[in-house]
């Protein structure tokens, strides 16, 4: 057997090369077999979060409130932007290379002949790392769907589904009812199952009832209301009043915050959180790439919106930002997305499109994308009022937008994690 890698980059390169050869069989039997050999188990409450949009925000709010309350928190969140280590957080800090290498070695030692995809292997390793980090609570973000996601080999004490919308149709189905059933797969008999989607699919409700989960629905078991200054949460047994709006910007953040507070209400005996800690946590929460407005002029917004539901939310949030002379979009997207439905809400908002290729075989071709966007030109637009330009990379598209935008303009980067990550990397290298 060849010697195992000793550095994190070498491990990730090995897993990527293996992934290309591993047939993705959608069942969890292989992951479960390795989990049992690892003796992977958590001796603390586990909160699992699934959903089409809003997963990362909900995880980030839970993490910050629990950290403010003095608990030691383990968080598995994905994907990463610049460093793989972003996926594993212990007590608010990214896991070290050394800790990740040790976790990869632990999985490799027991894996034997069982083939694992890159995602399955790294998920098991990070869950192993968190389980051995002496945390008071573990927060696990589901990657895709729920029922067949590698995270789902763990039984959560509280499972949250944030929103159900159309995405990843090749794996999850092409209706909200099919996708709702997949996401409800993280629910467990007798355990809290929270759904913050205002219109939950009937399949999700039926599955929760069929297995005897304790279903919490927005509007029935928990709710929120707010005015310009503050908002309040009401659950089954707990009210929280005079809350600050979450530091994460955007229209859907109160839905995500309510789901987080419902989870904390369920766990109030094991993990009590005071009013002051909840307020502070919500006021301090940070999450890159989710309607992230960068300081300075021109205004710059980074948002990983890559499906119709998220694009509609992005358009709504941009509409609430006040006047900007021109809006430039740095836009790259995967070919398997509903591209027309992602673009549609931004018609009339974006004046200049800087479209880009992405470092993935699934990426949409920038020339074809440009052709599609050219049809959005408003009737009677004068020269300089609308344009579409194609670039090979997010960095080149972003550099072009920066060179053209005036200080009263706005640049919006969206369409894929790869688009936002490419711009983040370009910004980082320009600062050094």
Image: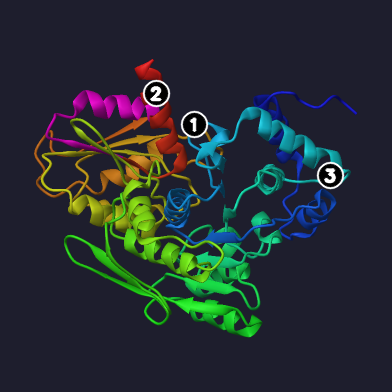
Q: Residue at x 13, y 30 (%)?
A: 407
Q: Which residues are magenta?
A: 392-412
* In front of the other: 381 or 309: 309
Direction from residue 8 to residue 65 in the image, left or right: left
Quick check: can you spot residue 173? no
Q: Is residue 404 magenta?
A: yes
Residue 327, position in %: x, y?
19, 40
Q: Residue at x 50, y 67 (%)?
A: 268
In the picture, the disc for residue 428 is 2
Split into 4 quadrants, where in the image is the C terminus? top left
Point out the tag, 1 or 3, that comes first from the N-terminus: 1
Q: Which residue is mark 1?
A: 82
Circles 1, 2 touching at the beta carbon (< 8 Å): yes
The Cα atoms of the two marked residues, 1 and 3, are separated by 28 Å
Q: Is residue 279 above or below residue 16?
A: below
Residue 401, position in %: x, y?
26, 29
Q: Residue at x 33, y 42 (%)?
A: 371
Q: Is residue 270 magenta?
A: no
Split into 4 quadrants, where in the image is the N terminus? top right
* In front of the other: 393 or 139: 139
Q: Which residue is mark 3?
A: 111
Direction from residue 36 to residue 242 in the image, left or right: left
| Secondary element at image label 1 | loop
Quick check: can you spot residue 395? yes
Point out the tag, 3 or 2, that comes first from the N-terminus: 3
Furthest-right residue in this view? 1
């Amino acid at each position: 057997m060849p010697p195992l890698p000793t550095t994190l980059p070498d491990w990730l390169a090995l897993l990527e090369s293996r992934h290309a050869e591993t047939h993705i069989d959608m069942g969890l039997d292989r992951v479960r077999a390795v989990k049992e050999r690892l003796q992977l188990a958590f001796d603390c409450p586990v909160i699992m979060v699934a959903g089409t949009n809003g997963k990362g925000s909900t995880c980030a709010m839970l993490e910050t409130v629990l950290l403010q309350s003095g608990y030691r928190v383990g968080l598995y969140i994905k994907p990463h932007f610049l460093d793989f280590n972003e996926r594993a957080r212990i007590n608010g800090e990214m896991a070290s290379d050394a800790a990740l290498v040790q976790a990869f070695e632990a999985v490799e030692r027991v894996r034997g002949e069982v083939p694992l995809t890159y995602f399955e292997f790294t998920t098991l390793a990070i869950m192993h790392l968190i389980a051995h980090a002496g945390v008071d609570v573990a927060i696990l973000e589901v990657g895709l769907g729920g029922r067949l996601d590698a995270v789902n080999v763990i039984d959560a004490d509280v499972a949250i589904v944030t929103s159900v919308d159309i995405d990843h149709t090749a794996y999850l189905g092409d209706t909200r009812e099919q996708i709702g059933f997949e996401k409800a797969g993280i629910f467990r008999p007798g355990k809290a199952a929270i759904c913050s989607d205002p219109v939950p699919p009937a399949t999700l409700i039926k599955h929760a009832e069929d297995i005897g989960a304790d279903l919490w629905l927005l509007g029935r078991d928990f709710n929120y209301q707010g005015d310009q200054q503050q908002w309040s949460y009401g659950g089954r047994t707990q009210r929280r009043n005079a809350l600050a709006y979450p530091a994460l910007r955007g229209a859907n953040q109160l839905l995500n915050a309510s789901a987080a507070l419902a989870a904390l209400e369920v766990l109030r005996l094991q993990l009590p959180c005071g009013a002051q800690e909840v307020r502070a946590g919500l006021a301090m929460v940070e999450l890159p790439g989710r309607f992230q407005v960068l300081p300075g002029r021109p205004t710059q917004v980074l948002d990983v919106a890559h499906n119709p539901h998220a694009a509609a939310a992005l358009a709504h949030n941009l509409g609430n930002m006040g006047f900007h002379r021109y809006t430039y979009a740095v836009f790259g997207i995967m070919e398997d997305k509903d591209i027309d439905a992602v673009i549609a809400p931004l018609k009339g908002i974006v004046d200049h499109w800087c479209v880009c290729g992405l470092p993935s075989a699934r990426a949409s071709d920038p020339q074809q994308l440009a052709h599609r966007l050219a049809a959005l030109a408003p009737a009677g637009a004068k020269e300089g009022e609308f344009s579409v330009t194609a670039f090979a990379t997010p960095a080149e598209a972003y550099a072009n937008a920066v060179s053209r935008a005036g200080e009263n303009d706005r640049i919006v980067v969206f369409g894929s994690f790869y688009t936002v990550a490419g711009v983040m990397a370009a910004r980082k290298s320009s600062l050094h």
